Amino acid sequence: MRWFVSLLLGLGLFTVARSEGEAKDLFLFGMFDQGNSPAAARKDPAYQGLLPACEMAMEQINNRSDILPGYNLKIPNVQFTGGRAVAVYHLIITMFHEPTMIMVLGPGGAVVDLIAETAPIFNLIQLTYSTYSPALSDRKTYPFLFKTIQTDNVHNPARVALLQHFGWDKVATIQDTDDRFTTIASNLNELLGEANITVQASGGFGKDVTTQLSQLENLKAVDARIVIALMAPQQCRKLLCWVYNNGMYGSRYLWIFNGALKENWWKPRKSETLDCTAEEIDQAMEYSIFTEPSFFADEGEQGIAGYSSPNHYWKAHVDYARLNYGATEAKSTVYVPLAFDAVYAAALALNASAAELPRGRELENWSYEDSSMRSVFFRNMEKTNFLGVSGPVRFDKTGDRLGRIIIKQIQDGKAVEVGKFHAYEKKMIWSDTTPLRWKGGQPPVDEVRKITREIRVSDGLFYTMVSLAGLGMIFCLLFLAFNFKFREKRVIKMSSPRLNNALILGCIFAYLAIILFGLTENVAESNQAFYMCKARVWIMVVGFTLAFGSMFSKTWRVYALFRHTKVEKKVIKDFHLFAMVGSFLLMDVLFLMLWEVLDPITVRRESFPPEEDPNRNDVLYLPELRRCASDYLMYWLGIIYASKGILILFGIFLAWETRKVQIPELNDSKQIGLCVYNVMIMSAVGVPIINLLDSQQLDISFAVLSVCIIVCTSTTLALVFVPKIWQGLRHGFEIQRSGKFLTRKGSSGTVTNACDDHISCKKEIIQLKNQINVLNKEIMDIRKRKESKGDRNGPSMSQAIVISADRLSVNGSSTSNHTKSTAGSTRSLPLKDIQNDIEMHVIKETST
């Protein structure tokens, strides 16, 4: 009843005052926590700073004609001492005493939430200036609370804008388990999701060491590069110590902290026991970023109060506090400009509300039961927009101030301002004087760009070997043309030109295999590589068989003809040799077809351990090798190596057995022997090296393979064709008179048959032929006489005298006059003299 009477008395006084034209008072309930005792009030920073700031703002407003004309703002001298319960007590007591409070200003710290829950009972709008807690943004619990300080949640848009500015779309978060930080993290994760930024990991960094290590190891496991840490300074220092010990700092990492208002908050305190030194923490903290609320407008911005710079405002505030309160430490709290702007925000909201109130209702008619007038106040408070001494003052739907967030970076151990985030415009402004700096000269990345790098044959090596193979193929074509053009010449004809053509074709295949080996590793499309994998195996196997099978078959013919000192009648034509080569090819084709059916070759990709780029911190190369492989590749290759090894051993055997046979124009036995030895040596060296090399050493493997093929193939071509070309250029392609023609080194020594000149050779051949005919006729006569006489008791076998020519020559060399009689049969090998078309019979001795 008393308060009701007081209210009526107050209304009466307001009516009298209005009739006299005097300014009416509007009271803001200023709540300032004075500390532990009233005696300390005059020395308390809040008393020296906050209250003078509010009164100075009110004095300016009361002297202005454009804000609340006809009204005076006042703050009753209601400071309190104590905690939360005392604050609520003062609020309630004040509500039941004169004068009527139109809004609540303050308090700060841990008291504001309880006041914010109580003030709505009296329809009071509350403005606070010193509380960061994001929990106060809950409109259901705190419906009429506005903050002139940026709460922790307001920092989150700045963090998101920072990530977007550098294109970081992956980030990890770690936060203290305190409710304040879990609320910030929850809001941050929501904003990150809206911005399409992936949260790699998010966990709590509590007091338990085991839990801390578990969360930190999780960051390491996901390879987090950009980490936002939301925690108190003491916890941050523990985290930084772990960061240093695990090497998660430097040019590849960025840590974003929520920061603190205390200077050098990241430096260890003497009372703390950490696993690293202060210097090590400074090293881990270097180039990290943290955010702070902005407490002043930018230099040169003149706000509603008329101050053109922070220093201009501070000078006026210090002078006012010293003059009116005798304050000696007016700068002791950073919340002073926020309290100053809170008064202006209340005055501007009330000023706008006064213009909206219907006629007959004035601000002085306000009462705690008037919810409709409170709705007008609330609506105009939400519309508040002015430039204060702390910067732009605007509120969002939760009552949070949309001011400016300072972005700071640690540079050379000091925190410097590198930019500001304008929350209302959602715009980042970077500093021109102190730009961002990064270790290595470039910002880190949210994750290492994993670039698949195919291991390929280097271009220089590839083009070199392909060029050599191409040059070899050109020589093959030249040799083929030479062999075809002079195929009727005796020197070429007697060395089996058809088999030489097959040899050349095999060499072309070998050169082509080199190109295919290089292209398989370097082509872009996998389907092309798939077909090349199959083609190169077929071409290599068939080429080897054609080239060296042809050589070995020619050597076998020489071996078959001269494997004994005695000579039997044996005709070995090119057809037989092609049949031998064809059988080798048939076995190859059957084997390759069986391989294709049972275990087809496919293109497979083999991955290797990642490699970091030494010049860039944002690239991690993933080496990948494209290989031609099958499930049992080594077994199939083993069979190929074994079969071709047997073929080489066969060639070595033939070359050894015919090493004493010297028939330069009839065969290439000596050259073929050299080729076989060359192939054996290169295979013995090359194959083990290729199989022992690491898969990644593709250049070395390709180089060894190419060199082996080129050396073997080129040597073979040179040994087979160069002597023939050289002889043709020097002496022509006919067989020369001089020198030995048919020579065989047997066990009985070297037997040489030579003719003195061409005419004498022809005469001797005719004479020998006539003698042979006469002797054969006599033999036939003897047989007939014996049969007619019926001599049954005679010798069991007829005796025949035959002329045996151990060596005959048709190039003008002399022939031996030795003749030998033997029992047995005679076999002849026809040879054709190019000039006289004389058929010669080489009668070779054979055992009975």
Image (cartoon, grey):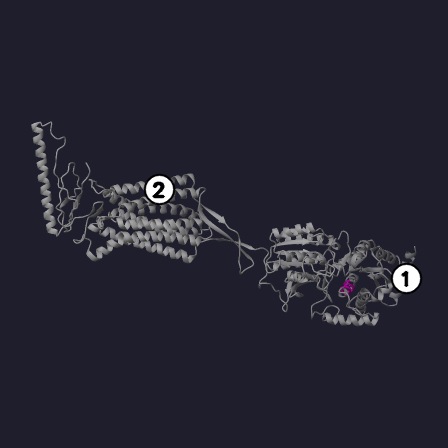
Q: For this rendering, which residue is in front, 312 or 2? A: 312
Q: Residue furthest front?
A: 748
Query: Label 2's element?
Result: helix
**What is the C-alpha distance between the residues marked 2 and 1?**
121 Å
Q: Quadrant of the C terminus?
A: top left
**Residue in view at x 58 percent, y 62 percent:** 442
Examine the rendered structure and indicate whether residue 180 appears above or below residue 795: below
Q: On residue 588, which mark appears?
A: 2
Query: Which residue is identified by label 1?
Result: 12
Task: Name the secondary structure under disc 1.
Answer: helix
Residue 128, percent from left and from top: 78, 60
| 339 inside magenta stretch | yes
Q: Is residue 665 magenta?
A: no
Location of residue 443 in the rendering, given as x and y in whole percent from the top left corner: 59, 61
Name the residue type under label 1.
Gly
Compared across the picture, whether 818 is left or right of 441 comes to: left
Q: Earlier in the sequence, mark 2 or mark 1?
A: 1
Region rendered in magenta: 338-345
Residue type at tag 2: Asp
Query: Left or right of 681: which side holds 498?
Result: left
* Disc 1 packing (10 Å; few <14; some 14–19; many ≥20): few
Which image quarter: residue 150? bottom right
Given residues 635 and 651, the one toward you in this image is: 651
Q: Is residue 550 visible?
A: no
Q: Quadrant of the N terminus?
A: bottom right
Say which of marks 2 and 1 sits in front: 2
Q: Main secondary structure of the magenta part?
A: helix
